[in-house]
Amino acid sequence: MSTATQALPFWRKYLFATDHKVIGIQFLFTSLVMLLVGGLLAMLIRWQLGWPGQPLGFMEKIAPAGMPGGVMVPEFYNMLFTMHGSIMIFFAIIPLLVGVFGNYLIPLKIGAGDMAFPRLNMISFWLVPPAIAIVCTGFFLEGGAAASGWTAYAPLSTILGPGQVCWIVGVIVLGTSSIMGGLNYITTVINLRAPGLSFFRLPLSIWALFITAIITVMATPVLASALILLLCDSTLGTSFFLPAGLIIDGVAQAHSGGQVLLWQHLFWFYSHPAVYIMILPAMGIASEILPVFARKPLFGYHSMVYAIMGIAVLGFLVWAHHMFASGMNPTLGTSFMLSTMVIAVPSAIKTFNWLGTLWRGAIRLTTPMLHALAFVSMFVIGGLTGIFIAATPVDLYLHDTYFIVGHLHYVLFGGSLFGIFAGITFWFPKMFGRMLNETLGKLHFTLTFLGFNAVMFPMFILGIAGMPRRIYDYRQYTHLAHVGEMNQFMSVAAFLLGLAQLLFIANFFWSLFRGRKAGDNPWQATTLEWATSSPPPHGNFTTPPTVYRGPYEYSVPGRAQDWWPQNVPS
Amino acid sequence: MRVWLPERISTYAPAIDRLFYIVLAITGTAFVLVQGTLLYFLVRYRGGAGRRATYTHGNTLVEIIWTAVPAAILIVLAFYSQRVWSYVRGTPPATDLQVQILAEQFAWNIRYAGPDGRFDTSDDITTINQLHLPVDEPVLLHLKSKDVIHSFFVPQFRVKQDAVPGITTRLWVQVTKAGTYDIACAELCGLGHYRMRGFLTAEPRDTFAQWLQAAELEQHPPPAPEPTAGEPGAESAPTSASAPSAPAPESQPASPTPQELLHP
Amino acid sequence: MNTQRVASIALMAIVTGIGCGGGRAQDAAARTEDAEQQAANVQLAETPETPVKAIRPAAASAATGGASLQGIVHWSGTAPTREKISMDADPVCQQQHAQAAYKEDVIVNNATLGNVLVYLKEGVSGSYSAPSTPVVLNQAGCMYKPHVAGIRVNQPLQIVNSDSTLHNINAKPTANRPFNVAQPVQGMKTDKTFTKPEVMVKFKCNVHPWMNAYLGVLEHPFFAVTGEDGSFTIAGVPDGTYVLEAWHEVYGAKTQNVTVSGGRVSPVEFTFSAQ
C-alpha cells in the first residue's frame, strides 16, 4: 500500500488527498488561518469598544469604506462581530474539533487504515475553502459583509444586501461539508473498529466525535433547510420568515404569512446542538489527555459515555432557551428552563469525573496537560454561568448583554479552544514526528490563560451592569457611562492575548522543522495511535492491531511500566 | 461608581435580583469548591520520581452522589425560578394605563390611547423615544415592530422584551421610583442599533397626567372659534401676511385632519 | 413587487455559487418613494416665524452667455402650517434648537412656494462637464442643509455631520446606486457621486425620522431651487425650446414650455396649490 502511495503525484498526495491524515492536516492549516483571521477581527472590535470612535490610521487603507479616516462606522462594527462569530464558529472551532481531530484520530484510534469513505472525506474538506471564500467575499462587495450577527435573525438578515446572501450560501456549503463528514465518521466508527475494540473500549475522544457526528447529521440538515428558506426570502421574495405588514425603511413590503420566530426556532434547533458539536470533542480530548498525564485510568468511564449521550439527547430539547425574551409563550419558557437545568447535570458529572481522574494521580504538567486542565477549569465557569441564564427571570435581564458574550466565550474559547490547544500540542508529535518546544508552549499557555481571563471575565461584570451586546458605542447610556475604563482594560488584555498567539505560531513552525524527534509514543500513552510510527505511514498500521483492553490502563498494579497499551497482548 | 447591577425601579426587580443572588451563591460555592479541589489535586498529586498513581476506574456510590446532588439543586432552582417567572410573565395585573410601543429602525414610536381608550384612533397621543409612565401603578406595554426585531430593555426594570414584527408582545411593569432612565434596544436591528435609545420618565401620577394632557393639547388643539380655513382675515391670512415676521403661536388653529399628523 | 426580483438570476446564482450579487440593487427600482404619502400630512394655517434661508446652490455659473431664465413659483390658496418637529427624541438635537424647529417641506411666503427645484427637463443639447467643487449636504441641528438642492452628474457630493450624534444617510435612488452610510462622529465627511441623472433622490436619516432632503441629479447646469420668495434664476440658457419642470416634494411636478431666442426669454410662472 505504501509503495503505491509513493507513486502518487504531489497533487494527489497532498492536495486532493484521500488519506484521512492529510485531510486532517489540511483542515488544521485551513482552520488555524481562519482562527487567526477571526482573532484579528476581534482585535478591531476591541479597539472600538476600548476607544470608541478613535481613528486607527492604518485601517483606512485596508477598509476605506468601513473605517473612513480610520474611524470605524457602526455598519462595519456590525460586520466585524458578525464575521468574527461566524468565522470562529463555522470555520475555526467546528473544523478544528471535528475536521482536524475527527479526521486525524478516528481511523488511528480505532485501528483502521482509513475512513470508510475516503473520497467523501476529500470532498467534505474541499467544500470548506469555497465556503470560506463565499462568506468572506462579502467584505469586498457593495454594502459589505454580513452584518446581522452569526444568528442571522430574520427579517434583518433578509434586507441586508449581497454580503448577507453570501453568508447564507457559504454556510449552506459548509453545512453540506459537515453532513458528509458526519456520515463518514459514523460509518467508520461502527464498521472499521479493530478486532477486540468493543464500543466500551473506545477512547472517550472517539465516543465524543462519534456522538458529535450523530448530532451533526441530525441537526445540520435543519439548519440547511432553514438557510435555504432564508435565502428564498431574501432573494426570491418568498415569505417564510416575513410576516404581513412589514414596512422596511418606509416602504411597505408585499410579504405575508411568514413567522419571524420560526427562524429562531429552526436556527437554534441546529445551533444549540451545534454548541455541543463545539464542546463534546473538546471534552473528549480532555478526557483523553487527563489520564495520560495523571497516569491514571479515566474516572467513571461509563458514566462519562452516558453523560455524552445524555448531553446529545438533551441538547435537542433546550434550543428555545435562547428565546426567553422573544415573545414566545411563557409556558414554553418554563419547559425549556427545566430541560436546560437538567442538561447541566451531565456536564457536572463530567467535571467531577475529571477531578476524580486527577485524584491520587501522578500528575505531569506538560503543555497539553496544562491546556486540558485549563479546559476543565474554564468550562466550569462557562457551565456555571449558564445556570444564571437558564433561570428564566434572570435571563430576562441578562439576555443579549455582555454576560452572554462572557458565557459563550468561556464555553467556546475557555472550553473549545483550550481543548483544541490541548489536542494540537498533544498530537503534534504524532502528526509531524517532532516535539513542540515545551518552554515556548508553557509560556504561550500562561499568557493565553491570563489574557483570556482578563478579557472575558469582566464581560460578566459588564453584563450584570446592563451593557447590551452588539453595541458599537455604549457611552451614551447613563447606566454605562462609567464602564469605559473596564473596557479599555479588556482591550489591552485582548491585544496581549492576540500577541501571545505569535508564540504559538512560532513554536508550531519552528518545531515543525527543528523540533526534537518524537518517536512513536512520546507521552507513554496507551491508545492505538501511539502504537504506530510518528507520523504514521499511509494505511496507518503495518500490521492491523488487535485490542485487548480498555483505553486508559495506567499504573496497573504489578506491572513495571505505568502504561499498558491497548494492543499489547496480556 | 461600582460596575454592578443598576438600581431597581420595578416591583419585580427585587424578586429577580434575589434569584440572581441565589444563583450567584450556588454557582459561587460550586466554583470555589471545584477550582479549589482542582488546584489542591494539582499540588498534592504532582507526579515526581517514584510516585505512582492509584489504580482505580471509579466509584459507583460517589458517582451517584455527585449526579444526584447537582440534579436536586438544579430542579429546586428551576421550581423557584418558575415562581418568579410566572410573576413577571404570567397574567398581568389589572391596569388603567396601556401604552403601545412601535419600534422601527431606529426609533421607538410611543402611543397613548387618548380619551377614547383605543389605539390607532385620531385622538391618540404620540411621541418619539419619550416614554412617560406614572409610578406605583401597573402599566401594560404593547410592543410591535415595523421592520426588524427590536428589544425593549430598561436595565432598571430587570427585564427586556423583544418587539417582533407580525406579532404584538406584551410587558407589564409597575415602576416604583420616579426619575429618568434610558431605554436601550437589546436586539441587533441594523447600523443604528446602538443609538436606538429611548427615554423613560417615571413620575408621580399627577405630573404624568399633566404631561399627558399637555401633549394632548399640543397634538389635538381644541377647535378654535375662528372661521374655517381659506377665509381671508383669519389669523392665518395667507396672502397678506408678512410671513417671516409673523410669530408662530404655540397653539395653532385647528387642523382640519389631525389624524394625519399622527400617522406619518 | 417581489416577483420583480429576477428569480431566474437568483436561482442561477445559487446554483453556481457565485451569486452573491443576487439580492439587493434591484430592490431600489421597486421602491418608488413615499413622498406622496407623506404629502398628505400638511396642515393649513400660517407660516411660522423661523426665517427660511434662501437655498440656491450655484446653478448656472458655469454657463456663459445665453439667457437668464427668471421666474417665480406661486402658491394659491391658504398657506399650510409648517409642521413642528418634536426633537425630544434625541437630546443632542433638542439642545441645538432653543426655539421650535419646523419642517422644511412646505414653505409658503406671500403666496409663493419655496424649496421647489426648477430645471430644464427636455431640450438641452450638448454636454456639460461637471464642476469639481462639491455640493455640500450638511446635517446640522438634526436637519439637512439644504433641504432641496440640485447636483450635477459626477459632481462630488460631500455629506457632513455637524452634530455630535449619529446620523445615517440613507439614499434610495432608483437610477443610481443606493447607499446607506452612518456618520457616528461629529465632523465626519462622506463623499459620493451620482453617475446618472435622476430627479429626485431622497435622503433620510433613520435615527431621526423627521430628517429628509432631496437632491436632483442633472446632466446640465440649468436648474435652480426657489428661495423663500419663490423666485428662481437659471442663468446662461442657450437658445432653444425646452420643457421646464418645477418639482415639489409634496405637490408634485408641473411643466411648461419655454423658448429662448436671441438670448432672451420671458419670465416664467408656476402655480401650485393644495388641491
Image: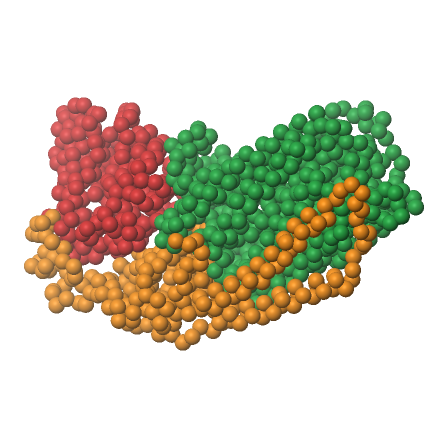
Front residue of A325/A391: it is A391
Left or right: residue B216 versus residue A43 is left
Residue A449, by quadrant, is top right
Q: Position of residue C128 (x, y in %)?
A: 28, 25
Q: Which residue is drawn at 49% across and 61% down?
A: A396
Supply the letter of whichever chain is orange: B
Quick check: C120 above or below A200?
above
Relative vertical location of residue C130 with respect to residue A423 in this rendering, above or below: above
In the rendered image, the vertical position of residue B242 relative to residue A392, given as above or below: above
Residue placed most toward the observer, A38 or C27: A38
Image location of residue C244, percent across then percent down: 22, 37
Residue shown at 16% from the left, 37% from the top:
C232
Q: Is residue B235 left or right of residue A307?
A: left
Name the one closer to the observer, C44 or C245: C44
Residue plotted at (58% across, 67% down): B77
Q: Residue at x 64, y 43 (%)?
A: A418
Q: Can residue A304 be seen in this view?
A: yes
Quarter holding the N terminus of chain A is: top right
Task: Give coordinates of residue B189: x percent, y percent.
Answer: 44, 50
Please identify which colour was used for chain A in the image: green
Between A160 and B58, which is closer to the camera in this rendering? B58
Is residue A96 placed above or below B235 in the rendered structure? above
Q: Identify the colour of chain C in the image.
A: red
Q: Is residue A551 left or right of residue A435?
A: right
- Residue A280 point in image, percent of width and height: 68, 50
* Residue A37 sits in quarter: top right
View extreme (right): residue: A570
